[in-house]
Image (cartoon, rainbow, N blue to C red):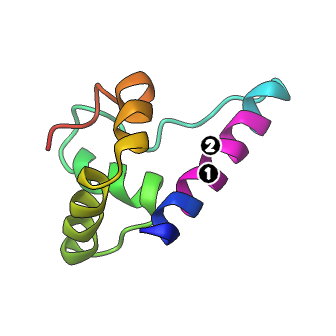
Amino acid sequence: MDELKAKLKNMLREKSDVLSGGGELEDSVRLGEPGWRERYYREKFEAKTVEEIEEIQRDVVRLPSYITISHCYYSFFVSE
């Protein structure tokens, strides 16, 4: 779980750096297109297999601070 927290912290910091520098993020998830869930977990959590996705889903449920963050930033993606 500490590894997940560290990944989230780093990803949020990187995205903040890009946006504060005037850059734009590419929409690699392509919400609504087939396979978007897999792309979401690959992009946000670097998951490569179904097993990794399921492990992340279990970890996220146990991580109260991420639930708050996800409601603010990713609520339109999260369906589990």
Q: Residues within 10 Å of mark 2 (few under 14, many from 20)?
A: few
Compared with residue 71, is residue 5 higher up or lower down, i.e. above or below?
below
Q: Is label 2 in contact with label 1 (beta carbons under 8 Å)?
A: yes
How far apart are labels 2 and 1 at the CA level?
5 Å
Element on which disc 1 rests: helix
Q: Which residue is mark 2?
A: 12
Compared with residue 18, is residue 52 higher up or lower down, i.e. above or below?
below
Q: Please name the residue shown 85% across and 29% down the image.
A: 21
Q: Which residues are magenta?
A: 7-17
The amino acid beneath tag 1 is Lys
Q: Please name the residue shown 50% across and 68% down the image.
A: 2
The amino acid beneath tag 2 is Leu
Q: Which mark is residue 26?
A: none
Q: Which residue is mark 1?
A: 9
Q: Is residue 8 magenta?
A: yes
Q: Quadrant of the N terminus?
A: bottom left
Drawn side of residue 21 relative to residue 10, left or right: right
Q: Please name the residue shown 26% across and 45% down the image.
A: 36
Please tell me in which quadrant of the rendered image residue 31 appears: top left
Question: What is the residue that sits farthest to the left in this orientation?
Answer: 80
**Can you give x and y, in whole percent of width and height, for residue 69 in the image?**
44, 33
**Can you give x and y, in whole percent of width and height, for residue 51 in the image?**
20, 76
Q: Is residue 29 visible?
A: no
